[in-house]
Image: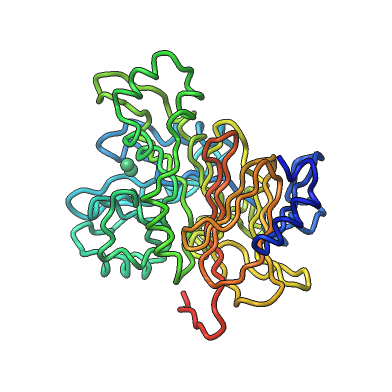
Amino acid sequence: VIARTNPLLAAAACALLGGCVLLPVLGGPPPRDDDASPALALEGFEDVRGLVHVHSVQSHDSSGTFEAIADAAAETSAAFVVLCDHLRGGPAADDGPDGRVHDVLFVPGAELNRNGGSLLVLGIRKGVDPRVGDAPLVGAIRERGGLAGVGHPESIRLEGLVDADACELLNIHACAVEEGRFALFFRSFFLPPRPFFSSFVSRLPGAAAVYDALARTRPLAALGSCDAHEAIRPLGPLAGAVDSYRRLFRAATTHVWVPAARAGPSLSKGDVLDAIREGRTYAASELTQDATGFRFVARGSSGAVRALPGGSVPLAAGDALEVAVPVPADITILRDGAVTLVARDARAARWIPLAAGAYRVEATFEGRPWIFSSAIRVTGENETLPGK
Ligand SMILES: [Zn+2]
Ligand SMILES: [Zn+2]
């Protein structure tokens, strides 16, 4: 609010306090991918919305058909769906849908219950053997072009999953469990679906702690998982479903940045997996506000973009981390999980890092969780990063 009434004063005060500069953008149209503003342009990349960790008829506890999922995804303007159906017993016999269903790209995947949480297999399903131990399984998944993600990090003991490519920062199933089934059940009677879901989408501190621990040493894709089993049944299957895929999908999305030429009909499984492997993602909850246009970059003092989420930059004088959001929101920049900067009711925020660490962004819209970015790593002078 102060920043709005007197941006120069706020910027000056903030610079004195900690080296940050708030850059609220007042009015104007929402940023688009072709926006000429240097603070918002993400050279050569396009923001593509997708759905990760979706359950279908392939799971024992879901009856959602691929067609129903595709139609609900299209209604959510999601270009891709990564199915993560449960694997029990032995290896899966097939990949399931791998390609387009009703114009929506389906990417195979699986969910394996592990250590109190789950291992999300992204990109492959056939032949994934749930009986294999964590670390060798992750190796085998990568060998075949797939990726490993941490599912339900809020409750997992990591053990052999420390070498993951991705980690949930948002999981609607986890949010529902945290809220309590009785509270949800009663609320479902008097709230319409959208406010109902909004009421329990929450930040998961346990998930954030796991993400921040793993992101220090490697690119780590932030995932927003609807973990949709077609419907959330607060009191079990007999008590009735609260909603179908349609609104669940808006509650948690995963955006990936892909090379601009690859967005649209040419988007492939490889494009989605490359973005996740490199951490070019953010998680969002878009029940009330579209997150498209969100930006987080490291910019050199010359003005060039030096890293996108998932990337790393050496600590250098004058380099800044820049954030932009499509509508005013509360923006938080965290370093290794600790709050570094809060910009309230702002369209943009800027922070000059003075310490190495994994920096990521969380934004809330009207007080509700909205955006969770993957981290950009700022490395110390003599630090060598493991390749990936
Ligand atoms: Zn779940
Ligand atoms: Zn699940």
Q: Quadrant of the N terminus?
A: top right
Q: Position of residue 133 (x, y in %)?
A: 21, 64
Q: In the rendered view, does 42 fall on the left or right side of 270? A: right
Indicate the colouring scheme. Answer: rainbow
Name the residue located 44 percent from the left edge and 38 percent from the top edge. Answer: 202
Give ligand 2's quarter of the image.
Answer: top left
Q: Position of residue 105 (x, y in %)?
A: 51, 46
Quarter of the view holding residue 30 = top right
Q: Position of residue 91 (x, y in %)?
A: 23, 55
Q: Is 78 situated above or below 168?
A: above
Q: Position of residue 387 (x, y in %)?
A: 47, 78
Quarter of the view holding residue 291 = top right
Of the pair 148 and 7, the residue shown nearer to us? 7
Identity of the residue furthest to the bottom in this view: 382
Q: In the rendered view, does 174 fall on the left or right side of 370? A: left
Name the residue located 68 percent from the left edge and 53 percent from the top edge. Answer: 349
